[in-house]
Image (tube, rainbow, N blue to C red):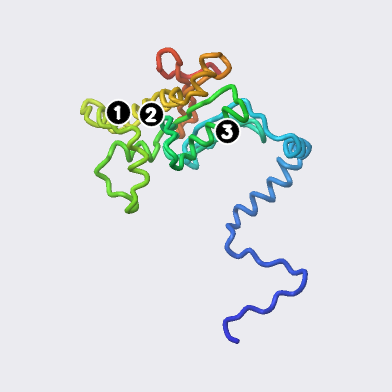
């Protein structure tokens, strides 16, 4: 019949026509490179499980991957990524909370010693928060609803006519990090562990255009570049 594919021969592999070729090429490079070099480490991790010391809450942005920025290998970081690297407040309301679920697992099961909230420059989510009149991307306006977590700060910064648009963007990117750290402390287990000295909260901001990393001072909330 016209339009039907020829029957697949026994033992013949089905073609993967629609899988991105660059990903397959990258996988081959991975197997011949990093996996080959660290094969024993992967086997140990598979058998014994993971025990990372640090959880990083990062943005979905493809230009700001924590494992790349911090040059970490397998098993070193537990990473949760969402739009604008935000942490919502503790809300045990029976709804779906993926970031909160990741926090719960990292803190209570893995018992990480550090949580880093890492923002970055030119964040699309932050840009959306500063422009609430922008047309939603879909009827559900998922991004707009998510960015409402920053609404009070966004409104205050957006109304500051002294700042340029780029300055408002950077200001909210950093205020958002402080806001997320404050929200982390609304989680009872995180608050208790921080008070007991077994968990430390950190903020960081990465500049995509220059590669600069800025670290938040936990006492003042100011950002500065670490000595290299």
| Residue 153 image label | 1
- What residue do we see at 33% from left, 43% from top? 144
Q: Are marks 2 and 1 in contact (CB under 8 Å)?
A: yes
Residue 180 placement: quadrant: top left
Q: Eyeballing the image, is 194 above or below 69?
A: above
In the image, taking residue 23 as reference, residue 9 lies left or right, namely right
Helix or strand or loop: what does disc 1 sit on? helix
> What residue is shown with label 3?
105
**CA distance separating discs 1 and 3:** 29 Å
Q: Are marks 3 and 2 in contact (CB under 8 Å)?
A: no
- What residue do we see at 68% from left, 33% from top? 50
Q: Eyeballing the image, is 39 above or below 188?
A: below
For marks 3 and 2 on the same chain, the one whose residue lies earlier in the sequence: 3
- What residue do we see at 74% from left, 34% from top? 48
Crowd tier of the residue under label 3, counting other residues whose Cα lies within 10 Å: few below 14, some 14–19, many 20 or above: few
Helix or strand or loop: what does disc 3 sit on? helix
- The image shows residue 208 at horizontal and vertical percentages of 46, 34
> What residue is shown with label 2?
176
**CA distance separating discs 3 and 2:** 23 Å
In the image, taking residue 139 as reference, residue 86 lies left or right, namely right
Determine the residue located farthest toward the bottom in the rendered image: 1
Residue 143 placement: quadrant: top left
Q: Which part of the image, by quadrant, shows the N terminus? A: bottom right
- What residue do we see at 50% from left, 42% from top? 62
Q: Which part of the image, by quadrant, shows the C terminus? A: top right
């Amino acid at each position: 019949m016209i339009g039907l594919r020829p029957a697949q021969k026994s033992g013949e592999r089905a073609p993967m026509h629609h899988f991105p070729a660059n990903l397959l090429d990258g996988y081959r490079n991975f197997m011949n490179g990093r996996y080959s070099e660290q094969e024993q480490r992967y086997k140990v991790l598979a058998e014994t499980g993971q025990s990372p010391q640090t959880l990083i809450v990062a943005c979905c942005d493809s230009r700001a991957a924590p494992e790349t920025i911090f040059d970490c290998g397998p098993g070193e970081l537990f990473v949760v990524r969402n739009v604008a690297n935000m942490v919502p407040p503790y809300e045990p309301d029976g709804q779906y909370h993926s970031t909160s679920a990741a926090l719960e697992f990292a803190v209570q099961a893995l018992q990480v010693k550090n949580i880093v909230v890492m923002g970055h420059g030119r964040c699309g989510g932050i840009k959306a928060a500063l422009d609430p009149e922008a047309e939603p991307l879909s009827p559900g306006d998922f991004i707009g609803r998510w960015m409402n977590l920053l609404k009070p700060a966004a409104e205050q910064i957006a109304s500051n006519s002294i700042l340029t648009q780029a300055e408002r963007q950077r200001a909210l990117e950093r205020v958002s990090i402080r806001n997320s750290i404050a929200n982390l402390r609304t989680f009872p287990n995180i608050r208790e562990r921080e008070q007991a000295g077994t968990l430390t909260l950190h903020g960081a901001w990465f500049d995509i255009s220059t590669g600069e990393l800025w670290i938040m001072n936990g006492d003042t909330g100011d950002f500065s570049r670490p000595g290299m």
